[in-house]
Image (cartoon, grey):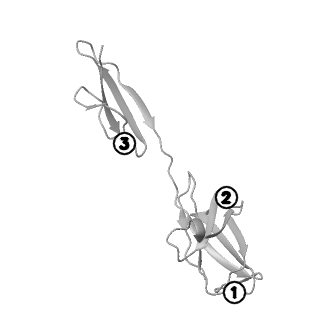
Amino acid sequence: MNSTVYYTVKSGTTGTTPTTSSNVYTGAISVASTETLEALANATGYASSSVATATYTFPAIANSTTTLSLTSSGSPVTVAPSTSAVTLTATVVSGSTHITAGTVNFCNAAATYCTDANIVGTAQLTSGGTATIKLWPGMGNHSYKAVFAGTSSYATSSSSTAN
């Protein structure tokens, strides 16, 4: 017996119960947010099945904000001196909540993407919501930015440039 499956997708309470006039299932159905899929099967000469329901829930991903500070010998600096160690500290928050899990990449701020050779260091966020690296900048001017890689709960974010 060959059956045809008909379905509807509901967002919240918007949508209808499937009938033999609804969408015909032919393959994967894209679901991009929390939605409810309802389906029924029908074969010629038989009564339609009861409606089967499944809800697909996607967790909300909260925004994050990343800030970057530079210090040298324990004091804040606005220009990274090439004669001493510089500490780059990124702070990652979501609203007033410090994000305590995830990775921060520190990179050349002039780079379009914080990947590969543009990364000067990587650190894990601590329980205080900070990630820190220490480096000795080479000769010349350098600008840095911090990029939080994001998690399943928090979106990616980048700091403004620090010199």
The residue nearer to you, when weighing 83 against 13, is 83
| Near-viewer residue (40 or 137) | 137
Task: Tell whether 137 sits left or right of 18.
Answer: right
Question: Residue 109 falls in which quadrant of the image?
Answer: bottom right
Residue 11 — which label? 3
- Compared with residue 39, is residue 146 higher up or lower down, i.e. above or below? below
Q: Label 2: few (<14), some or many (≥20) within 10 Å?
A: some
| In-image side of 58 versus 162 (left or right) | left
Residue 50 figure quarter:
top left
Q: Earlier in the sequence, mark 1 or mark 2?
A: 1
**Mark 2, residue position:** 100
Amino acid, disc 3:
Ser
As helix, strand or loop, the secondary structure at mark 1 comes to loop
For image coordinates 77% across by 81% down, the residue present is 74
- Is residue 38 visible in the rendered image? The answer is yes
Distance from the alpha carbon under mark 2 to that under mark 3: 33 Å
Q: What amino acid is labelled 2 in the image?
A: Thr
Instruction: Say which of 84 and 52 sits in front.
Output: 84
Q: Which residue is mark 1?
A: 81
Q: Earlier in the sequence, mark 2 or mark 3?
A: 3
Task: Answer few, some or many: residues within 10 Å of disc 3's Cα (few below 14, many 20 plus, some between 14 and 19).
Answer: few
**Where is the N terminus found, in terms of image quarters?**
top left
Q: Amino acid at mark 1?
A: Pro
Give the vertical position of 48 relative to 53 (above or below).
above
Q: Give me the C-alpha separation between circle 1 and circle 2.
A: 30 Å
Q: Residue at x 71, y 63 (%)?
A: 128
87 displayed left or right of 49? right
Quadrant of residue 7 within the rendered picture = top left
